[in-house]
Amino acid sequence: MSTPDERIAALEAEVVTLRAQVQDLLAQNQELRARLAKDSPNSAKPPSTDPLGRKRPRSQRRRSGKKPGGQLGHPGETLHLVGTPDEVVEHRAVGCAACQTPLEETAPVVGCEGRQVQELPPLRLRVTEHRALHVRCPSCAQVSVGTFPPEAASRAHYGPRVRALAVYLVQAQFVPLGRTQQVLADLFGVQLARGTVVGWVQQAAHTLAPVEKAIKAALARAPVLHSD
C-alpha cells in the first residue's frame, strides 16, 4: 500500500501530465480554428475549396497599362561584394598553363582575382554551460556562490533567441504550430512539444502587454489613424 507522500507525488505527476495535455489540446484547437478561417481570398487555397454560398470579393485593383516584369529605371537587386569577408580561401595553380612546369610555393604571385560566395553558416545550436562557482572567503571561510544569468533559469534551458524565433514564426509569419516545430527540428535539431511553443507565445504576449497598452493609448489620442 502506498504512503501519503507517494500518493501526493503520483497526483502531482498526473497534474503535470494533464496540464501538458490541456496545452496540446488548446494548441490544436487554435490551429483548427485558423484552418477553418482560411479561404481562397486570404490564403493560397483554390476557390473550389471555399464553402458553398461564400462570395469572393472583387479585386479593387485597376490596370496600370505597364508591361509585366521590371520597369525601365527600376534599381536592380545586385549582390554586392563585402569589404571584409569572414574567410579567404586561396586557390593556387599547381602547374604552368604554358610549359607545365610545377609551380612551387616560392613562385611569385603577381596578381589575383576574387569571387565571393555568401552562404549560411552550418546551422546548429550553440550550447553554453554556465557554472556558478562556490568560492571560499580567505578571511572568514564563508562560501559564496556565483549568480546564474536570467537565460539559465534551469539545468537545461532554451535561450532567448530560440524562443524568439519560434514566436516570430508563429505570430509574424503565421506558420502553424506543427510546422514551426518541424522547421526548428529540421534546421537545428530542436525537439519541442507543441505546448512549449504555445507557452512561449503566451509568455511573449504577457511581456509585450505594456507595449501594446501604450500603443493603444497613443492610437486613441491620435486625431487620424489612417486605417480602414
Image (cartoon, rainbow, N blue to C red):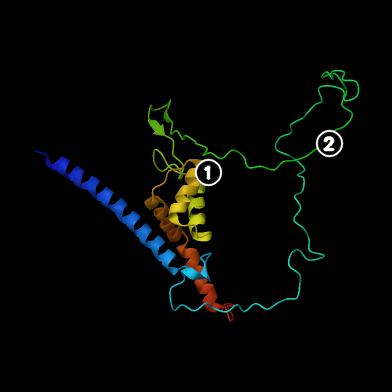
Disc 1 vs disc 2: Cβ atoms closer than 8 Å? no
Q: In which quarter of the image is the C terminus?
A: bottom right
| Tag 2 residue | 113
In the picture, residue 77 is in which quadrant? Answer: bottom right
Query: In this orientation, which residue lies closer to the viewer: 83 or 64?
Result: 64
Residue 131, horizontal then vertical, whole percent: 45, 33
Q: What residue appears at the point 42 percent right and 67 percent down from the top-left corner?
A: 36
Q: What residue appears at the point 44 percent right and 41 percent down from the top-left corner?
A: 152
Residue 202, horizontal then vertical, whole percent: 41, 58
In the picture, residue 8 is in which quadrant? Answer: top left
Q: Is residue 129 visible?
A: yes
Q: How crowded is mark 2: few (under 14 residues within 10 Å), some or many (20 or more)?
A: few
Residue at far left of view: 1
Q: Residues within 10 Å of mark 1 (few under 14, many from 20)?
A: few
Sequence-wise, the earlier of marks 1 and 2 is 2
User: Looking at the picture, which amino acid does disc 2 mark?
Assistant: Glu
Query: In this orientation, which residue lies closer to the viewer: 140 or 128?
Result: 128
Residue 226, horizontal then vertical, whole percent: 60, 78
Say what secondary structure mark 2 lies in: loop
Residue 213 falls left or right of residue 76 = left
Residue 118 falls left or right of residue 94 = left
Residue 48, horizontal then vertical, whole percent: 49, 70
| Tag 1 residue | 187
Query: In this orientation, which residue lies closer to the viewer: 86 or 35?
Result: 35
Q: Distance between the residues labelled 1 and 2?
A: 34 Å
Q: What residue appears at the point 66 percent right and 42 percent down from the top-left corner?
A: 119
Say what secondary structure mark 1 lies in: helix
Q: In which quarter of the image is the N terminus?
A: top left
Q: Is 13 above or below relative to 111? A: below
